[in-house]
Image: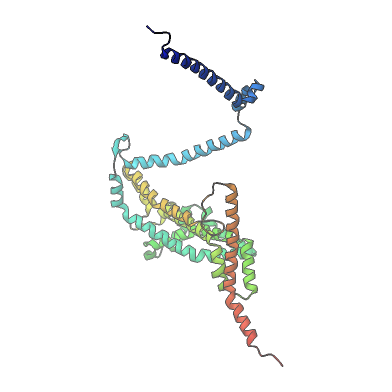
Amino acid sequence: MTMPGDPSQAMKKPTGESGAQAAALDGMHAGSQHETRNPADARQPGTHLASQRRSFALPSLRGWLAAGQWLVTLALCAFLIVPVVMSIVAGLTVNYFRGVASGLTLRWLVEVWTQYHGSVFLSLEVAAATLVITLVTGVPAGYALARSQTRAARVIEELLVLPIALPGLASALALLSVYGGFRAFRMSAAFIVVGHVVFTLPFMVRAVAAVCASAGLRTLEEGAASLGARFTQRFVTIVLPNIRPGIVAGALAVLTLSIGEFNLTWMLHTPDTKTLPVGLADTYASMRIEIGSAYTILFFIMTMPLLVAMQWLGVDATGTRRAPRKPHRAKRAVSTAASGSATASAATATASAAIAPVSRHAVNSTTDTPQKP
């Protein structure tokens, strides 16, 4: 029972009124926020529906073309990569016919290395010897063919391509018919090196000749020659640094082709000179498919680091390593321009360094000449 003058009743009544006022204020505030958030929608009721329609619009023709290009690229990559992945998986499984469910093992890799490690080292030796010979002969040949404008140079260039146009078996038969009578040479690994040089030399010559044919290199040489630089100075200090991209590209082609060449090597090899591709064919023909797949893994381990290393060295058109990609187009354009100017400055400095001794000699000789009174 409460008394009329109870202060608690007096306090409850204002509290209720203040709560109602607060709720009303919150509602007005929410309404004002809604009106402030979408003033355009309040004025135009169909604007929101139009924006939804635009958001669900079909892609343009350029978008469909880009999507088609991505699909074709991914399908082509899958077509090329999936067989390699399946072969690697087969070389790591206990039983190929049961698949991964049979378990993973390194047994087949160990067995392949035990039986064919000699072929691995022989392939590396043959590839290294082939690379040295093609560098010594192919770089000067490519430079000479690029500088010569005679018909004889074009004939020689076409003759160099013949080993590529002919099947490897035909080239091997030609070598056997000419050099097969020299028994010691026929039974050695040098016979395989000769065949690989005949097959890979055109790749080195073409790669070097393509870089030597540039007009910028010819201009640098002419400038150095006009200031008195000898041919050896021009070739060592100007030509070789500027044709490095072609040399690197040719070396990459020579190494990969020499390690993986089978047709020509199969005809030229002996039981004591069996290289990697010949051993791979033997494993697939006479042993379990797991061993052949493990041999493929070994082949993959040998070639992939080589490719990555050669690409890391760079075959950039400026002769330097590729700079890391920039996220912004403007920054990328600025860096490209700076790289080009730096390359031009470096080439000019190289030419000046090559010509400096000749220029100093000319100045000294002029100074030492006695003048008439």
The single residue placed furthest to the right in the displayed view is 373
Horizontal side of residue 250 vs 360, given as left or right:
left
Query: How many labels sit on residues?
Result: 0
Applied colour scheme: rainbow
Examine the image and state in which quarter residue 127 appears: bottom left
Q: Residue at x 55, y 22 (%)?
A: 30
Residue 199 in view in this figure: no
Residue 291 in percent (x, y) is at 32, 44
Q: Residue at x 64, y 70 (%)?
A: 223
Examine the image and state in which quarter residue 70 appears: top right
On the rendered image, what quadrant is the C terminus found in?
A: bottom right
Horizontal side of residue 279 vs 342, given as left or right:
left
Residue 93 in percent (x, y) is at 31, 39
The single residue placed furthest to the front in the displayed view is 5
Residue 93 in view in this figure: yes
Q: Nearer the viewer, residue 3 or 74?
A: 3
Residue 225 in percent (x, y) is at 63, 73
Horizontal side of residue 123 vs 335, given as left or right:
left
The single residue placed furthest to the top in the displayed view is 1
Vertical relation: 364 (above or below) 247: below
Vertical relation: 233 (above or below) 337: below
On the rendered image, what quadrant is the N terminus found in?
A: top left
Residue 184 in percent (x, y) is at 36, 65
Vertical relation: 335 (above or below) 289: below
Q: Nearer the viewer, residue 2 or 355?
A: 2
Q: Nearer the viewer, residue 160 or 20?
A: 20
Horizontal side of residue 287 vs 55, given as left or right:
left
